[in-house]
Amino acid sequence: MSSPVDFVTVSTAGLESSPVADALAGLRANEARYFKNKYDHVFTVSSPDEDPETLKWVSDILREERGIVISSPALEVSAFEVDGIRMAYVFYRSGLSINVMYTIADGGKRAVGFKLSQGMDVPEELSAFKFARQRSKLAGEIRGSYFVLKSEH
């Protein structure tokens, strides 16, 4: 069952097994606040068992585009469409968050973003990427990177 993410009262529900659960919960809440403020969209998450298609879509894109296989188990996923953009998120036990932004119209922006929770190391499978830092009231310091999709998915 999908559940909305509260960005006012940050909860680690669903993320308790992560060694950086508080920071990952803040990162998830940061995303929820962004979508609520920009699109008036309520960000919801499900377990990968409840929405295996989203996890498969994101995993397939990573493998096909860059040969990346994430070693950490997925804890939660989210998938939705806003303003003609298909969005998918996967939150991993390690503290990693991966999102796919896929504009449905031809010629639109299509990219994969990586965000690292405060307190986690860069995973070996993402060591080729350079990460920029940003501050967040909800998540502390977030390190992020991305790549542009070359193929259709």
Image (cartoon, helix red, strand yellow):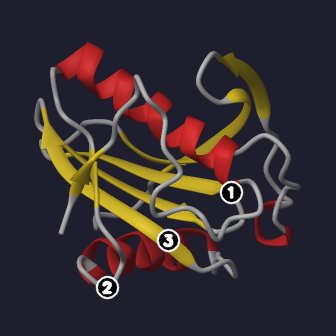
Task: State the residue position of label 3.
Answer: 75
Labels 3 and 1: the sequence-earlier one? 3
x%, y% of residue 47?
A: 34, 73
Element carrying mark 3: strand
Give the answer, above or below, for where 85 lies relative to 114: above
- In the picture, residue 89 is in which quadrant? bottom left
Work out how far the residue at label 1 is from the one at label 2, CA to CA, in angstroms.
19 Å
Q: Position of residue 140 (x, y in %)?
A: 73, 25
Residue named by callout 2: 49
Viewer-side residue, 69 vs 138: 138
- The type of residue carrying mark 2 is Asp
Residue beneath disc 1: 95
Assign the C terminus to one quadrant of the image: bottom left
Q: Quadrant of residue 38?
A: top left
The residues bearing labels 2 and 3 have C-alpha atoms spaced at a distance of 9 Å
**Residue that appears at 26% across and 40% down:** 43
Which one is earlier in the sequence, the residue at label 2 or at label 3?
Answer: 2
**CA–CA distance between discs 3 and 1?**
10 Å
Q: Is residue 22 left or right of residue 152?
A: right
Quarter placement of the N terminus: bottom left
- Is there any visible trace of residue 90 in the rendered image? yes
| In the rendered image, the vertical position of residue 31 relative to residue 57, given as above or below | above
Residue 109, above or below 37:
below
Q: Amino acid at mark 1?
A: Gly
| Crowding near the residue tagged with mark 2, few <14, some 14–19, many ≥20 C-alpha atoms within 10 Å | few
